[in-house]
Amino acid sequence: MGRKSRRSRSVYDPAIEQEVTFAQSSDALAITDPLTLEAQDELNYLEEIIDPNSEQRDFQRRRRYQILVPMIFAAVLIVAATARLGNKRSDESSSSVRSYPSQTVLPAPPSDIDTKCSVAGVASALGRTACEMICEAADCCGFQSSLPLSCLSSNQAYCTEYLSSCSVLDEEPTKNEVGQGVSGDEDSVDQSPSANPETTSPTQSSVELNPGQGATYSPSVDLVLQVQVDEVCALDDMGDIIECTEICSPALCCYLPFKAEARCKEEPLNMNCETYRGCNAL
């Protein structure tokens, strides 16, 4: 009887076969079902978060950002600095070695310029020096507006006022005017170098006969320098203007608009302005 029962269990059962087939089809449907796939993705994401290797990968990613961002920032700074330096050098090469005074705004002439730079004001050496100091600010007014050293075009009103008052400096001071000094008494006139013919200060005639007396120049060197000044100051191009300005810089008192040739002849200059006659081209 017991053997018969075991045989009956081994007999094919259609119901059981149907259950197995239904289970297999359900598994296949679950694999292709969108909801099932979304759930699987969420599960994979959770596994990735829980995975200890993911934290290490995030650390490595942040580490790369920390290295790359400063490098990129430094590269941008280098490029910007290089471009700025290149622009600065190009600006310097396109302009002369001297700044263009035409872009300079002159200071307003002092209210007492007419008094200090009058004939009476420059009668003494001290008064003449005071007038010269005032007029030095407007040296650029005496150059043609087309020249680099000119500031006339942007300061016409002030230049007109300066030129009107400072023109008194173009007049040659008399012996008494140079020798009066501060006190203006007769004793100071008698003690002045111009009033004493035995002094060694060069006069106009002595400078012409012995150019450069008291300095390191000899007559032949003055002649050579005079020819060089005349050639350089022919002003054929912008380069000549720069060279002429440089070679004429030792003799500013000879050729500036408010020149004081009398002071050029005094110690310690002892300069023969005839040597620098070509500088008048500026």
Image (cartoon, rainbow, N blue to C red):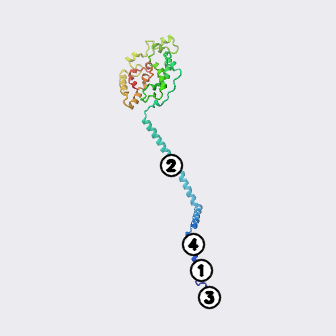
Q: Is residue 3 above or below residue 27?
A: below
Q: Which mark is residue 4?
A: 3
Q: Which mark is residue 16?
A: 1
The residue nearer to you, when weighing 152 against 245, is: 152
Q: Residue at x 54, y 55 (%)?
A: 61
Type of the residue with mark 2: Ile
The image shows residue 192 at horizontal and vertical percentages of 47, 13
Q: Is residue 214 above or below residue 27?
A: above
Type of the residue with mark 4: Asp
Q: Are marks 1 and 2 in contact (CB under 8 Å)?
A: no
In the rendered image, which residue does mark 2 sit on?
Answer: 72
In the rendered image, which residue does mark 4 sit on?
Answer: 27
Type of the residue with mark 1: Ile
Image quarter of the N terminus:
bottom right
Tell me which numbered mark, 3 or 4, is placed earlier along the sequence: 3
Badge 4: residue crowd in 10 Å (few <14, some 14–19, many ≥20) = few
The image shows residue 85 at horizontal and vertical percentages of 46, 40
